Image (spheres, grey):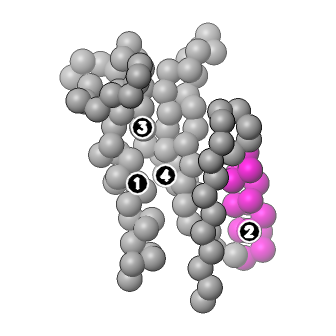
């Protein structure tokens, strides 16, 4: 078995999420196993960005970050980046198991 790794980085809006979704779909259609995750921005009803979710390629979702005004006080964590409250536990619960495949 030959493992290949792909990491996409880039400025917001250049198409990283679109590319990974298309690549995942094409590989799956060709019976090539994929494993990974991407992040997706969350917008409110007026179109303003209010946070990010982490989504695994097998469809599991978790909250990665939300703006302070979108996060109830009882859910706020000590982890903040700019205007966002970050939820590292949700990220770790979804993403870290994906890497266990490579350490076994």
Residue at mark 1: 94
Which SS type dominates the magenta stretch? helix
Residue at mark 4: 60
Image quadrant where residue 23 sits: bottom right
Residue 5: which numbered mark, if any?
A: none
> Hey, which residue is sitting farthest top in the picture?
46
Where residue 79 sits in the image (x, y, percent)? 29, 32
Q: Secondary structure at mark 1?
A: helix
Mark 4 vs mark 1: which is more N-terminal? 4
Decide: marks 2, 4 in contact (CB < 8 A)?
no
Decide: marks 4, 1 in contact (CB < 8 A)?
yes
Mark 3 vs mark 2: which is more N-terminal? 2
Q: CA distance from mark 3 to mark 2?
A: 26 Å
Q: Residue at x 41, y 19 (%)?
A: 83
Q: Residue at x 64, y 52 (%)?
A: 8
Where residue 12 sits in the image (x, y, percent)? 65, 33
Residue at mark 2: 27
Most foreground residue, 79 or 21: 79
């Amino acid at each position: 078995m030959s493992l290949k790794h792909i990491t996409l980085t880039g400025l917001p809006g250049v198409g990283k999420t679109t590319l990974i979704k298309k690549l995942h779909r094409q590989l799956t259609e060709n019976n090539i196993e994929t494993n990974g995750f991407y992040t997706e921005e969350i917008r409110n009803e007026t179109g303003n960005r209010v946070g990010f979710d982490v989504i695994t390629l097998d469809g599991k979702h978790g909250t990665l970050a939300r703006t302070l005004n979108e996060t109830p006080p009882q859910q706020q964590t000590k982890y903040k980046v700019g205007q966002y409250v970050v939820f590292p536990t949700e990220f770790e619960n979804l993403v870290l198991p994906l890497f266990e495949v490579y350490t076994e």
